[in-house]
Image (tube, rainbow, N blue to C red):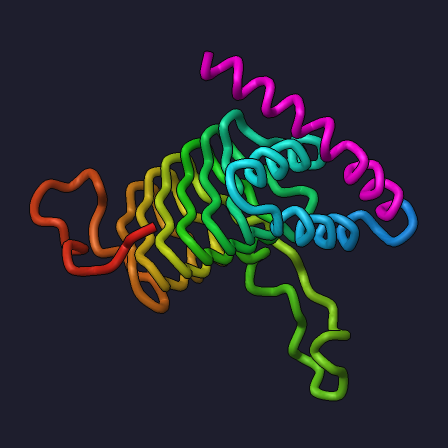
Amino acid sequence: MRAMAKAIARGCSRVAVFPIWLCYLLQGLLGGKVTAFYGYSQLMSLFPGTSGDYLRYAFYGLTLPRLGTDACICFGATLSHPGIEIGEKAYIGPFCNLGLCSLGDHVLLGTGVHVMSGFAQHGIADLEIPIREQPGTMVRVSIGEDCWIGNKAVIGADVGRKCVVGAASLVNRELPEYSVAVGNPARVLRSRKEDGTDPLRDVPLHA
């Protein structure tokens, strides 16, 4: 019964967002796909509660190249690029902001996590040209399967599979798989494969 109710809710949600999706397609043709996508992502972020989760799932199921089964995108979360990929049962917490990225299966993002499109989105070399007008480069950032990223962390480099990143940490270089990392910039404290006392027992990692 639960599976049937979920299927019905998802079907109704897809019907409900279909006009929004058509408007997004039209605006994308007129004003650019990336700009249109981010605007409609802001709109979709405003729907509260479980119904909002279903509506977002339906919209992103129509617009993203990959949205895994039972992924959850919470209230206030915004996605800034239509090339974002989200894995099976991934959880994107409230008020997250995602740039160009790929999230593996079972990834957990706490509240307010920012996944950037790398650290070279704006050029700064020419002092005579405003930074906003200098060319930059967007890089796809990958977070491997079964990672837990704590509240308000900023991720600008790849995170290997099965990592844990502490709350408010800044990941500015690649983290190898199984890493437990914390800090600004984030440093690896240990591997999850190691035995012994957990060095993060007093560090807030709550998602």
Residue under the point 29% across and 60% down: 182
Residue under the point 31% across and 48% down: 164
- Given residues 180 and 76, the one toward you in this image is 76
Residue under the point 21% across and 60% down: 203
- Given residues 93 and 105, the one toward you in this image is 93
Magenta residue check for 39: no
User: Which residue is most to the left?
Assistant: 196
Magenta residue check for 24: yes
Horizontal relation, residue 100 to residue 71: left or right:
right
User: Which residue is most to the right?
Assistant: 30
Q: Residue 197, relative to residue 187: is it above or below?
A: above
Residue under the point 65% across and 77% down: 124
Q: Residue 138, relative to residue 20: is it above or below?
A: below
User: Residue 32, image x and y in percent?
Assistant: 84, 51
Horizontal relation, residue 108 to residue 132: left or right:
left
The majority secondary structure of the magenta stretch comes to helix
Q: Residue 42, relative to residue 177: is it above or below?
A: below
User: Residue 92, image x and y in percent?
Assistant: 48, 44
The span picked out in magenta is 1-28
User: Residue 2, image x and y in percent?
Assistant: 45, 16
| Total tally of numbered discs in the picture | 0
User: Residue 169, image x and y in percent?
Assistant: 36, 62
